Image (cartoon, grey):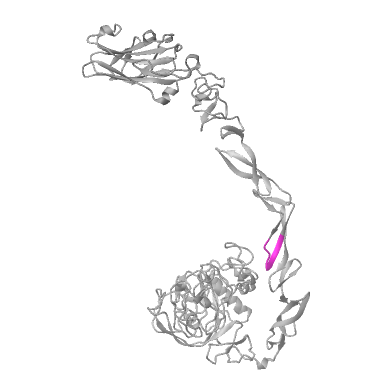
Amino acid sequence: MTTIGEFRGEVGADGRLQITVVKPSEAADAGLRRYAQGLCSLNIVQDGVPASGPADSIEMVTIFEGLDAECEGFAGTPLYCGVVTVRSFYGAPQNDVFAQILTLAPATAVSVANGDVVPGGSSGLGSWSYGDLGGLASAPANAATHSWVFARTGINFTFTGRVVATVAEVCDGVDNDCDGLVDEGQGCRTQGQSCTEVADCTSGLACTSGLCSVTSCAAGFHVESGSCAADTRSCAIANGTGSQTYAAGSWGSCSLVTCNSSYHANGNACDANVIPCSASNATAATQTWSAGAYGSCIVTACASTYHLESGACVSDSRSCLTLPANATAGTESWTGSGYGSCTATACDSGYVVTAGACVGSPTSLLPLGAPCSLSASCDSGFCATGPVGTANDRCAPLGMNYIPAGTFTMGSPTSEVGRLGGETEHSVTLTRPYFMAQTETTQGAWKAMSGGMNRAMYQNTTCTYGSCLANENANDSGPVEQADWYSAVAFANALSVAEGVTACYTLVGCNDMANGWTDSAHDGCTSAIFAGLDCLGYRLPSEAEWERAARAGTTTATYGGNLSAASGCATLSGAGSIPAGTGVAAIMWNDCSAGNRPRAVAGKLPNDYGLYDMLGNVFEWTQDWSAAYPGTVTDPLGPASGSNRVFRGGTYDYDLRYARAAFRWEVYPGYRTPQIGFRLARTVP
């Protein structure tokens, strides 16, 4: 259906009805093409004969009228009316042209069109066909005509309308009406053909994005790009094949069907049948897939100081099968394709290790705490280097250094960079010399004492914290962490018993420790009774002992000097044997250097007491309950009871404020964290 012309009407100032015909646009005119003898052109003219174009034409004529007698007998007084006439030249078929009244206002107005009363107040008021407007006349006077009558009955009113033409289209693949489209609006076009509206397409199809498309599919199929596709289809999987299932209007993930040769299914992926695997102390290994599961890890190369033996990496040195005379421990070194000779590493009482053998006599051995030279033999332990610049080399337990008695200033000045609360400076006198462990207690020492139980989160075998870390802890040389205060003093007791000295603690309310060191052996402890500083067994240092040992005679923020900043990798002002300008990374593991994990002990410069990692790596438990500092004090141990124990020293993932000699912090004694470990002390006999 194509608009030929439009008309509108209104009552003029003189009370007469004026009707205006509007010629359609050029685009609308070009759409009227299916008239006499296929000439495919139709000119619309107003009030006259077409001036040009083919003979076939439609003319719309505007007529002004005013009296009832001139309006085809429509009665009414007073009555004005108007007539619109359509005239066809040269044979327009019947019913090809008709009129529509679109609007009539106000609602009280009435009009007549082709003899029917038309009410006002609505739109699309109807259409009227005018029969065969054909005829072979060549002049307007002889043309077939039809008129519309619009009447006024005492009120003003307006109306609009249009003259339209319908042109029959047939599904024959031909542009019947010469509008550039084939079979449009007739339901002729099939799936995938172009369309402009749904009427162009055959039944059951929609017009989507200019193409006739299906709207629904049979069970097991779905609409996809205008067609019906199966609900499952093949999809690509690396090294395998798969299927993709359609669900809720979209494709789901690709599901594995089968893997190619030399690959196996791993979830919805295909993995190679031989893949790398992780083996302790190995630098290369393969893991073989067989019968639906992986086989054991096969080592192909080992790290330095290890060798391949029976499919595993074994240390190049191991405990001897036959010990040297008078030895309590020894190692056998691996050379070439066999083991070398056995070398003593520990001797019976009264003997010392000399060139891999046990030699000496009980009468020549010095007692613990006695002054010694580095060539001297000690009764239990070794001659340890004392504070730098003094004659304090003493016989000390293995792995411990001698710390002399004396007076020092504890706390920090208010001007110290990074200073925190609770660090009031005060004078402290320690009347007892003591031994301090050179390093934090290691994972290896912990496992040896506990029968193999590993408390640490950061460990080399079973991953319990993040992913397995290929770091220094592979050789158990990292500090033990995740040890609460009760576990630390229980370790001290166990070491005292193992070496035949008095244990310094009585633990109360703990789980059954008689059954060994299990993961929960020291859970639930309610208290610990300390035997005091005169106890000669292993113990935790008091808070004052810890700070004196950490300072090693210095008075600055660290034993390397003051800090240039409270965070980052600051430089040091220099103190003790550490020169000015040294970076903090030279003396400690903290958040600027540790890579967010604890590191092997003794990896940085020691202080002038020969102690490593007093600042950084992991925090260290002390003996004391937490309390505010007193004034000048001698041999302080803190209050007799409390809720939190003090820990000191900084850690691998904290900044420099927490890695100063004066920094102190507290937490309840049952607390475990990867940031806290401990080191042991002993009173000198």
Work out which quarter of the rendered image holds the C terminus and state it: bottom right
* 111 to the left or right of 250: left
User: Is residue 346 placed above or below 85 in the rendered structure?
Assistant: below
Magenta segment boundaries in residue numbering: 277-286
User: Residue 383: x, y in percent?
Assistant: 61, 88
- Classify residue 640 by image quadrant: bottom left
Image quadrant occupied by the N terminus? top left
Q: Indicate the position of residue 280 as horizontal and vertical percent values.
A: 68, 67
Outermost residue to the bottom:
363
From where the camera sits, is residue 367 visible? Answer: yes
Is 207 magenta? The answer is: no
- How many numbered circles are shown? 0
Q: Is residue 68 left or right of residue 417?
A: left
User: Which of 425 and 317 lies nearest the eye of the viewer?
Assistant: 317
Vertical position of residue 583 compared to residue 221: above or below: below
> Of all residues shown, which one is farthest toward the right?
337
**Above or below: residue 343 compared with residue 652:** below
Of residues 421 and 562, the one drawn nearer to the viewer in this rendering: 562
Specify the quadrant of the image occupied by residue 371. bottom right
